[in-house]
Image: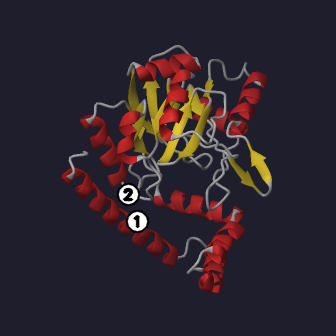
Amino acid sequence: MIGDLHVHGHCTIGDRLSYESDIAPDLAIPYCCTELKMGFTTLIGNIGQRKGVKYSPLADYHEGKKFLDRFSHKFPGFVLVPAIEVETSIGHMNILGIEQEPDPSMSFEELLEWIRDNNGLSVAVHPFDARGDGIGKNASKTDCIEVFNSINIDRISNLMAQMFAEKHNLTGIAVSDGHTYPDSIGLGTIKVHARPTVEGILESIRKREFEIASMRYLDQPKYIEWVWLRLKNSREDALSYVRNKPGLNALLPLARYLCDSFLEDPNKEIWKAIFGATLRYYKLRNGIRYMGYKAAHVI
């Protein structure tokens, strides 16, 4: 049974740009079943607010479950795994298999204990990503680690995760971290040897009775399309961030011009050049981090 354990539903809220994903359960589930021949997935959410409406981190999961219950005859045996991405005090982590919201006041260590007490699975997501959102070497404390994430297109991030997992004998999984329908779903998957239940899938991962089934990166045009989609739906968030950030507020007119220019035509050569330069910067920065980690014998 093949599945993708890191797909974001359309209720996911970003930190600076509130709009993150256009993946609705009634589209994602049929696509996973019919086009990708997958047996399970997540529709991850997080705690946040968009345009005055607070979303439950499990909103997409519950919406997906209702859809599956209604059309169970069309998708027999398909499993929707409850999942939440949380921003801990030291970085992002996913919680799999628990239909409850964690207390946001818990420390990282308390959260790990809560997950295990509730028979869930903790996942170090994009632990060495170029933006620094992951938990880094603290990934050794979680149940498993993403050794491949399809939007780590600098590639060094995944290399560092793979080497870290090998050195510390950690359970490594491949995921898509999908945010756009349908292109980003199923780029990173695993094949489990388990009965088609949430408990069976999680137990298979705990026992390492699975193998990585696919590892494909989100390509550059689709990545730019995702950035355009986020900015189109969160333009005011972006401008508000610049307006309220000390040292940046004087650049608000320029930011507004660049934002509107990108939204008008994201396929201009200038944007491709900027994307390429940004990617090279992240590769360089993460390459330096990689050498630092190696020197410190972390990987």
User: Residue 47: horizontal and vertical position, in percent?
Assistant: 67, 45
The picture places residue 51, in percent across and down from the top left corner, at 78, 58
- Quarter-of-image position of residue 209: top left
Residue at 56% from the left image edge and 48% from the top image edge: 183
Q: Which residue is mark 1?
A: 279
For this orientation, the residue located farthest to the top is: 195
Q: Which label belongs to residue 138?
A: none
Q: Which residue is mark 2?
A: 154
Q: Position of residue 48 (x, y in %)?
A: 69, 49
Image quarter where the C terminus lies is: top left
Residue 119 appears in the picture as rendered: no
The span from disc 1 to disc 2 (Cα, nearest Å) is 6 Å
- Crowding at dot 1, Cα within 10 Å, few <14 / some 14-19 / many 20+, comes out as some
In this picture, residue 293 sits left or right of residue 121: left
Task: Please state the total of marks drawn on the protein image.
Answer: 2
At label 2, counting other C-alpha atoms closer than 10 Å, the crowd grade (few under 14, some 14-19, many 20 or more) is many
In the rendered structure, which amino acid carries the disc numbered 1?
Answer: Leu
Q: Write the residue at 25% across / 57% down.
A: 292
> Is residue 112 shown above or below 269?
above
Q: Give the quadrant of residue 34.
A: top right
Answer above or below: position of 36 versus 19. above
Q: Position of residue 96 (x, y in %)?
A: 55, 30
Against 215, residue 264 (above or below) is below
Q: Closer to the N terminus: mark 1 or mark 2?
A: 2
Q: Residue at x 66, y 29 (%)?
A: 100
Q: Nearer the viewer, residue 185 or 103?
A: 103
Q: Are marks 1 and 2 in contact (CB under 8 Å)?
A: yes
